Amino acid sequence: MCRPGQTFEHEVLGVLKLYGHKIERPPKLGPDGGVDMITSLDAPIGGGRYLVQCKDKEAVGREDVDKFIGTLERENVHMGIMVTSGRFVKKARKGTNGRVQFIDGPRYEELRKRLTEWLQIKWNQQR
């Protein structure tokens, strides 16, 4: 999954940065209170402040999503991004009223691949 010395959260951070997110609070070690990182996106559509929750596991269920929505409400943040290396069970995606963007394993791998390609291009331009 992750390269040695890197956490899933730090890989997700790299992908979000590539897509224009500014990192307000990066991932930290230890308990995170249901928030792996806080980002902001300066865009006329879809912009704003995001709480990000990363789940490096096979399946994310409704209970995980409900906890995350509770965290959004507690932190008074309207939007969240939930990323998993696996998949979201069918019920997990329902009833979030568009407050949560879901990125499952296949989509994450696609975004990560784009990040790798972009970094390779940048590396080759500097050589």
Image (spheres, grey):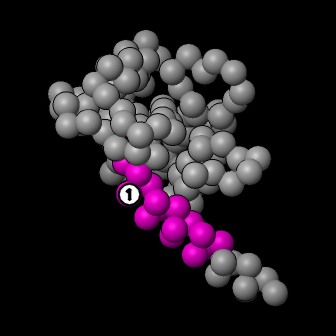
Q: Is residue 90 left or right of residue 125?
A: left
| Rendered position, 127 above or below 30 | below
Residue situated in front as seen by the camera: 59 or 51? 59
- Quadrant in which residue 33 is drawn: top right
Residue span colored magenta: 101-119
Look at mark 1 in the image and give the residue it sits on.
106
Image coordinates of residue 70 in percent, x first then y, are: 37, 15
Q: Residue at x 71, y 47 (%)?
A: 6
Q: Residues within 10 Å of mark 1 (few under 14, many from 20)?
A: few
Residue 39 visible in the snapshot: yes
Q: Is residue 114 left or right of residue 31?
A: left
Image coordinates of residue 109 in percent, x first then y, are: 46, 60
- Most frequent secondary structure within the magenta stretch: helix
Q: Residue at x 33, y 51 (%)?
A: 45
Question: Does residue 10 belong to the magenta stretch?
Answer: no
User: Secondary structure beneath disc 1?
Assistant: helix
- Quadrant in which residue 96 is drawn: top left
Q: Residue at x 57, y 31 (%)?
A: 36
Image coordinates of residue 35 in percent, x first then y, are: 53, 26
| Rendered position, 12 above or below 31 | below
Residue 81 visible in the snapshot: no
